[in-house]
Image: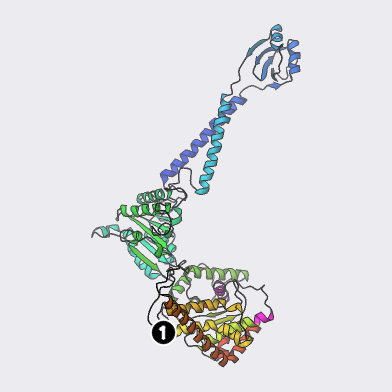
């Protein structure tokens, strides 16, 4: 194994670093040589006085001049030792030459030794006409290249931009990764191969060439890859998929080749490519040219993964949250053999993640990480780290020496709903509408058995455009929902709008987001889940969504226009049925609606315990956060 090392530049090897240093030393030597030449040329002569031409002529007529050398533009001469114009022993003088036809006659008459000389400007011309312009062009060219490729030299476009961490500098092990135990178990086999490859080679086993980590943003894919390197104690090459692609054709493929050359020289090692979908998208999709730079880079990556020895000790680990767009050739056995899904953590996983991050901060004795885990369903590792950091910052602003549960509560609200807009002042009418709107959500949620329990109701503006919100927390992690539960969820979303209609006999624009979410639920029930009695257990093609992102990819309909009209009618019927159901419920619970709205107008925030007193129900609590605004 090569000696431990780490380099942040594009070369990634000791040999390239020595070449770069050698190149810099020659630059210094060349500069010193040029400075020396200029110095010798301009300053090697003795000190010379500059005088006027009239003084020169008078000295000449007085017979004080001993000898002169006539140049094209000036005259350099020497006075006799007996001349009274010699100052401090300096006999040499220089004068600008003027058009004097009698000069040579006067010199001959006075017996002055004279000669002519053509000025040698070759060195000066060479420097100013050739060396200096080329030096300026070189500097400009280097600057442009460095702007396009920071940290690289002019000739290093084809060098890999991977950062290399030595085995002692990975700094992360599996102990630092929590909430994804299944993924860690699958990677332990990779660790064992890197530590004891002979064990697998004896029986002819081949370790997977590549491991693809897929999961939602923030679930810990990059952290898990670094932990893999730290656990195996091998060098770790880390770079992003976008680091391969440049504006110049062929650069990406050259960088792929250079990366695998470095990895092979450092084997056993791990190569980690984050966001591999930047170069690994399926070829031939869209209107891009078939020989476009990204596709050339992908082709080179495929060839390199096919070419190296499976027992060479080079493991390629890649991460993406868009596995559905990757090229099938990249996912076949022999390249990325193993796919590891990293899902959002469950209740226990969230608690374990909180324990890891809590080691870095000071917690008060009243902090219960299990309660925080219950109140943060749907959060990934990055979200939980952000909650702890926000709580720490808030505790510091409040001049506390420890983080208390109050700071965690505020941090969770900050992450879920945004920053409080304390400066936003609503008039009395808007505040009343918001209070009854949020009270409508809470009353419906507290009254329906399939709805998630309400944890908090507030009319303090937060985030962008949210004048208040109702926070619901389910009692446990859920992976399936029944038809009645979906209808109850839809009813809660309609509760705010219908409460406004009941109290004020009109509706406001505050229910825009509620209506969008309610309509999505109704459409999914009809088109995806086969929950329409009229259309039956049939699934219709709908807009496709990425596995781990919230964006929508529109697709063509594969059903008739008549069926589309039937779907629209069923969606409207579901919305109408639930609207009627909620209206009746709010009329029956109007006293609770009025009481909760008035409490909100007084306090602005009503917690779960106070809600239970208003509704005289048993306490319900729990985890995926549902925020209704």
- Is residue 234 toward the left or the right of residue 76 in the image? left
Front residue (pair 538, 312)? 538
Relative vertical location of residue 14 with respect to residue 415 in this rendering, above or below: above
Residue 627, can we see it? no
User: Which quadrant would residue 316 be assigned to in this image?
Assistant: bottom left
Front residue (pair 191, 435)? 435
**Which residue does the image show at 46% across and 73% down from the upper left?**
350
Q: Residue furthest toward the bottom?
A: 588
Image coordinates of residue 476 in percent, x first then y, are 45, 81
User: Which quadrant would residue 229 be assigned to in this image?
Assistant: bottom left
Relative vertical location of residue 159 with respect to residue 414 in this rendering, above or below: above
Image coordinates of residue 73 in percent, x first then y, are 66, 20
Front residue (pair 224, 628)? 628
- Look at the image and give the residue range highlighted in magenta: 406-431
Q: Which residue is mark 1?
A: 534
Badge 1 local density, few (<14 within 10 Å), some, or many (20+)?
Answer: few
Magenta-colored segment: predominant secondary structure: helix
Q: Residue furthest toward the left?
A: 203
Relative vertical location of residue 422 with respect to residue 267 in this rendering, above or below: below
* Residue 336 included in the magenta stretch of the image: no
Residue 301, can we see it? yes
User: Which quadrant would residue 177 be assigned to in this image?
Assistant: bottom left
Image coordinates of residue 286 in percent, x first then y, are 42, 59
């Amino acid at each position: 194994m090569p000696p431990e090392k780490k380099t942040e530049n594009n070369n990634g090897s000791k040999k390239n670093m020595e070449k770069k240093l050698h190149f810099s030393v020659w630059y210094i030597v060349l500069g010193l040589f040029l400075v020396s030449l200029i110095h010798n040329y301009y300053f090697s002569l003795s000190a010379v006085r500059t005088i006027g031409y009239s003084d020169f002529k008078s000295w000449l007529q007085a017979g004080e001049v001993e000898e002169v050398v006539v140049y094209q533009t000036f005259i350099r001469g020497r006075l006799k030792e007996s001349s009274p114009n010699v100052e401090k022993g300096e006999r040499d003088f220089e004068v600008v030459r003027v058009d004097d036809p009698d000069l040579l006659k006067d010199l001959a008459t006075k017996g002055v030794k004279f000669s002519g000389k053509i000025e040698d400007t070759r060195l000066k011309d060479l420097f100013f006409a050739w060396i200096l312009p080329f030096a300026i062009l070189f500097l400009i060219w280097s600057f442009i290249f460095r702007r396009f490729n920071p940290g690289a030299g002019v000739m290093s476009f084809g060098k890999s931009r991977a950062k290399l961490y030595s085995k002692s500098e990975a700094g992360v092990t599996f102990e630092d990764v929590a909430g994804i135990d299944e993924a860690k178990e699958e990677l332990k086999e990779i660790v064992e191969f890197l530590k004891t490859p002979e064990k697998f080679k004896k029986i002819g086993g081949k370790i997977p060439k590549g491991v693809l980590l897929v999961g939602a943003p923030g679930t810990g894919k990059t952290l898990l890859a670094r932990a893999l390197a730290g656990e195996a104690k091998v060098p770790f090459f880390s770079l992003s998929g976008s680091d391969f692609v440049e504006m110049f054709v062929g650069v990406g493929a050259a960088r792929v080749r250079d990366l695998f050359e470095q990895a092979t020289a450092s084997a056993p090692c791990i190569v980690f490519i984050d966001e591999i979908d930047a170069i690994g998208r399926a070829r031939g999709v869209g209107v891009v040219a078939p020989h476009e730079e990204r596709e050339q880079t992908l082709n080179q990556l495929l060839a390199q993964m096919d070419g190296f020895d499976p027992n060479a000790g080079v493991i390629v680990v890649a991460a993406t949250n868009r596995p559905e767009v990757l090229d099938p050739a990249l996912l076949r056995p022999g390249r990325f053999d193993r796919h590891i899904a990293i899902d959002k953590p469950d209740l226990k996983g969230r608690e374990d993640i909180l324990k890891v991050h809590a080691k870095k901060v000071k917690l008060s004795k009243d902090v219960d990480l299990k309660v925080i885990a219950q109140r943060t369903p749907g959060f990934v590792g990055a979200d939980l780290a952000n909650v702890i950091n926000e709580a720490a910052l808030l505790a510091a602003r409040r001049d506390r020496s420890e983080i208390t549960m109050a700071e965690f509560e505020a941090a969770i609200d900050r992450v879920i709903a945004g920053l409080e807009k304390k400066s936003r002042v609503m008039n009395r009418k808007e505040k009343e509408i918001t209070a009854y709107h949020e009270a409508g959500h809470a009353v419906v949620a507290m009254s329906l058995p399939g709805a998630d329990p309400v944890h908090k109701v507030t009319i303090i503006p937060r985030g962008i455009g949210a004048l208040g919100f109702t926070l619901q927390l389910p009692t446990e992690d859920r992976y399936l929902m029944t038809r009645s539960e979906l209808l109850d969820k839809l009813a809660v979303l309609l509760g705010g709008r219908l409460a406004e209609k009941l109290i004020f006999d009109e509706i406001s624009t505050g229910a825009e987001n509620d209506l969008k979410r309610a309509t999505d639920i109704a459409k999914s029930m009809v088109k995806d889940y086969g929950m329409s009695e009229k259309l039956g257990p049939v699934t219709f093609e709908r807009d496709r969504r990425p596995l781990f992102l919230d964006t929508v990819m529109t697709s063509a309909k594969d059903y008739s226009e008549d069926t589309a009209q039937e779907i629209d009618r069923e969606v409207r019927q579901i919305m109408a049925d639930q609207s009627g159901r909620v209206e009746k419920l709010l009329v029956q619970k109007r006293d609770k609606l009025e009481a909760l709205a008035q409490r909100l107008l007084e306090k602005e925030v009503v917690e779960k315990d106070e809600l239970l007193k208003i509704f005289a129900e048993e306490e319900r609590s729990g985890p995926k956060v549902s925020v209704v605004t």
